[in-house]
Amino acid sequence: MKESSGKYEDIDQYELKALKEIKENLDRDEGKTGYVDLVKGVACGLVFGIGGILFALSLFPLVETLMRGGNMTGFVGNLIVCAVCLVLIVLLGIYLLRQLSRVKSKPRLSRESAEVLDYAIRRRQHTLEQREKQKL
């Protein structure tokens, strides 16, 4: 009989350790994603801002040259800058949409799940404490 109670106690201890490890990993992952999201947001904002300004600054001379005609000296340079900025903005937009869809599909720990996990940890601890008291 004592051997079977020892096995149950070992199982409860392993379950308790596993639950605590799951809780730690989930808490750690949530804190890390906030920092990563902040860095990605700042980087994307800078690229969108600088790329958008360069696009607008190079688009105006292109439109003016096409409307009025003449002065083709800076046309090719402005066309290249405009095209590069437009491609950069489109590619970054696609990248952000992929990241958002990946984040939405990733399972997250809800408040109810966290409460259930905390309850399971407390229950396992209580069970182990009760078995220790019964041994004494």
Image (spheres, helix red, strand yellow):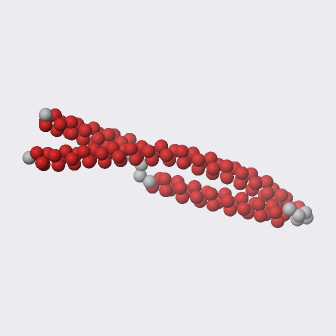
113 or 27: which is nearer to us?
27
Q: Is residue 69 visible?
A: no
Q: Residue 4 or 90: which is nearer the viewer?
A: 4
Front one among 61 and 22: 22
Q: Horizontally, is 18 left or right of 52 in the view?
A: left
Which of the image's four quarters has the C terminus?
A: top left
Q: Tell me where residue 67 appears, x and y as whole percent.
A: 85, 61
Q: Quadrant of residue 65?
A: bottom right
Total labels drawn: 0
Residue 79: quadrant of the picture: bottom right
Q: Quadrant of residue 69?
A: bottom right
In the current view of this chain or complex, which residue is farthest to the left?
1
Indicate the position of residue 24 as horizontal and vertical percent values.
38, 44
Q: Residue 102 at what x, y percent from top left?
A: 49, 56
Classify residue 106 as left or right of residue 91: left
102 horizontally vs 49: left or right: left
Q: Residue at x 75, y 60 (%)?
A: 82
Residue drawn at x 50%, y 47% as measured from the top left:
33
> Is there any visible trace of residue 22 in the rendered image?
yes
Residue positioned 77% across, 60% down in the render: 81
- Residue visible at 22% across and 48% down in the picture: 11
